[in-house]
Amino acid sequence: MENKDILDEQASTNREQPDNLTTEDAVTVNGGEPEDNAETVPTEDVVAETATVSTPEPDNTNREVTELKDKYLRLYADFENFRRRTAREKLDLINNANESLLQALIPVVDDFQRAMQSIENTDDVSALKEGVSLIYTKLFKTLEGKGLKPMVSKGEVFNADLHESVTQFPAPTDDLKGKVIEEIEKGYYLNDKVIRFAKVIVGS
């Protein structure tokens, strides 16, 4: 009786298929062939599409670099030449700034030389005075032509931007207090720019 019960349990076990059978187990159970409705996952290689970037060829790149380098060297050389030429012209300008003034003063020097020769050969004092006066006038006109102008200071209100006070004296009249009562050394302008301050005496 017990042997019969054991046989019945084994037969029941063979008829039931376990729930956790794998695909391979299922194939084995079904006689070695997979079921028609079994899902199969394809193993295809996925290739990523990359954007094609057009890169210049090495020969073109090298040629462009060479051209740009040559252009840079030419520009640098031109700039160096310009800088040297400008510095040379500036130096020449500084050295020859007084050329036109000196050329204008040469005739005055000639007049002085003739006057000195006349002094040795004549005793006419009045003629010598007249000659010196003419030379002075010519010299002053030449300097005025170059932009030199004398400064008028006497009787003007003292101005520290124009005048240099040497000393102070009591003013002869009340209206001259704080004004220039005497000019010791004349001041000068060059094209409206003060190139020498006037040395004056101021009334107090």
Image (cartoon, rainbow, N blue to C red):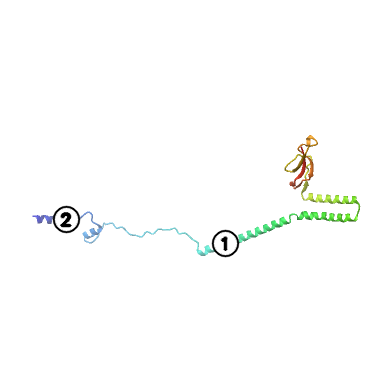
Check disc 1: other Cα within 10 Å, few if <14, some if 14-19, many if 20+: few
Q: Is residue 116 left or right of residue 84?
A: right
Residue at the disc numbered 1: 69
Amino acid carrying label 1: it is Lys
Mark 2, secondary structure of its residue: helix
Residue at the disc numbered 2: 13
Labels 2 and 1: the sequence-earlier one = 2
Mark 1, secondary structure of its residue: helix
Distance, label 2 to label 1, CA atoms, is: 90 Å
Picture quarter with the C terminus: top right
Check disc 2: other Cα within 10 Å, few if <14, some if 14-19, many if 20+: few
Estimate the x, y position of residue 153 in percent, counting from the top left: 78, 42
Q: Residue furthest left?
A: 1
Name which quarter of the figure residue 180 lies in: top right
Residue drawn at (50%, 64%) of the image: 58
Estimate the x, y position of residue 156 in percent, counting from the top left: 77, 40
Front-most of 193 and 168? 168
Residue drawn at (59%, 61%) of the image: 73
